[in-house]
Image: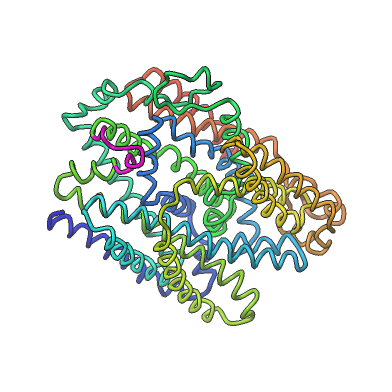
Amino acid sequence: MQFVDWIILLLYFLASAYVGIYYSKRAGKSTHEFFLSGRNLPWWLAGTSMVATTFAADTPLAVTELVAKNGIAGNWLWWNFVFGGMLTVFFFARLWRRAGIMTDVEFVELRYSGKPAAFLRGFRALYLGLFMNCVIIGWVNLAMASILEGMFGIPHDQVMMYVALAMVLTAIYAALSGLWGVAVTDAFQFVLAMFGCIVLAFVVLGLPQIGGVSGLVEKLPAWTLRFTPVIGESSQMENIGGAFALSLTSFLAFVGVQWWASWYPGAEPGGGGYVAQRMMSAKDEKHSLFATLWFTIAHYCVRPWPWILVGLASLVLYPELGPDEKRLGFVYAMRDYLPVGLKGLLIAAFFAAYMSTVSTQLNWGTSYIINDLYRRFLKPNRDERHYVSISRLATGLLMIASLLVTLIMGTISGAWAFVIEAGAGLGLVLILRWFWWRINAWSEIAAMIAPFIAYGYVKFYTTIQFPESLFLIVSFTTIVWLAATFLTKPTDSDTLKKFFERIHPGGWWKPIAEQLPHVKQDSGYGKLIIDWIAGILLVYNVLFGLGKLILGDMQTAVMFFAIAAAATSILYYHLFTK
């Protein structure tokens, strides 16, 4: 890092601080401004904010590791979430905006009634807003620490001090500016982070050791360039190198079960967390839908290829890296090959990725703690300025709690699989609670507890491994929550009628709909299913088309783009001409 690099980094931090100060007065008006931007975000800003949040400091490193170990097809570990993402776009984005609530946890008492609903709301506020949030921020902090350690050689016992300084700055602008500042800085940070990663990909591909894309292809084994996993029985998958190989049951678990059955932060079935927060902050229902559509397209089509190319190049540049070090190939490429100026830009880009994620987590987690715990159970009926002041204080306290969690975390290797398994089966309740009147608070409580029981049985009494374990855990959880549903009383009639009048969802609402003949229930689900399929085809074909274009296979790229164009025309006809 030379003087120019440090100046670039300083300018980035000053720009982030300026945004926080600029929006501080607006955010201080009310909690709706602080947590939802007054429900006035345009679709492009809300969607870009979602993309920036999912682009954490560890994301390029994780993709580099997947590609280095399993080739391009290793990305199917997260590419399979396209199915659930598009389901959220067309079936749930409008409903979340229509709900008129501040958090997805508040939805619990909009949809359910009685003490079970109150307990569930308070529990989820603490579990998601405090515990899970601190773990996620801890993960991101550890990733940023590994980047700084690898880039600058900062001693391991000192690196967290630098991460803490970045987090303090992030907490300050998040506390000052609320969601407006978070969303605006997210857009700025996403553009900077993507530009930096694209520049790195060009620099690395231009190295003599690589020789451009054609040279990279020549130097790599064929298995690294596969876009899809090798699927078959283990006896049929010998001598295939390091390709991402799945048994048929594993493949079916990924593409047929995981995306709708498992709760996972940022990819909740039916939307949830900060994704729901952005949908609820959009200007109207249409902006909510377009925000989520743009997020899904950008998340899967715009972001991955620069990371994938650097990951492939790292196999050539750093063949000596062991299995646990392959993720650092991205950092070493930055350190070893970027010229003066660009090095500072890339470090700023990684800080941008880090801060966009942390700022959202702080604002989103605080919204649960204040709206669903403090205001609901501890201090109701206070004025808005009081809640905004407490929100700013809570943001700072959440930052401190997250740093403490980070210090006691060694590693979270495999945590993503644990989270998916421990939430397997809950997803179906999160989807059906919109469309089936009989779901109640006990359904959701049972669906949260049952996976942990099944997970314990699978881990200690069987040899079943993830993802095949999903079949057993989801089946058990589904039986448990269905039993809980029919063995307990339904949500009271008044709550169901108020919910139906506000949301007027489609699905199985006949006993309630008959009491409210003046409410027009949503219809047109056949068209929504077509849009869902078209959206999935659009994303996968643009994703693979760009990959084939980059790798020089023009004929196949044109075929993928043609299918994507057909899917786009269907969506355009349904969204703009009807």
Q: Quadrant of the N terminus?
A: bottom left
Which quarter of the figure has residue 98?
bottom right
Q: Residue at the location (29% across, 23% down)? A: 217
The overriding secondary structure of the stretch rendered in magenta is loop
Closest to the observer, 204 or 13? 204
Residue 461: x and y in percent read 65, 42
Check the image and report above or below for 508 versus 216.
below
Residue 37: x and y in percent read 49, 65
Closest to the observer, 27 or 576? 27
Magenta segment boundaries in residue numbering: 318-328
Q: Residue at the location (29% across, 51% down)? A: 147
Check the image and report above or below for 555 versus 127.
above
Which quarter of the figure has residue 166?
bottom left
Number of disc labels: 0
Residue 161: x and y in percent read 29, 65
Q: Residue at the location (79% across, 46% down)? A: 508
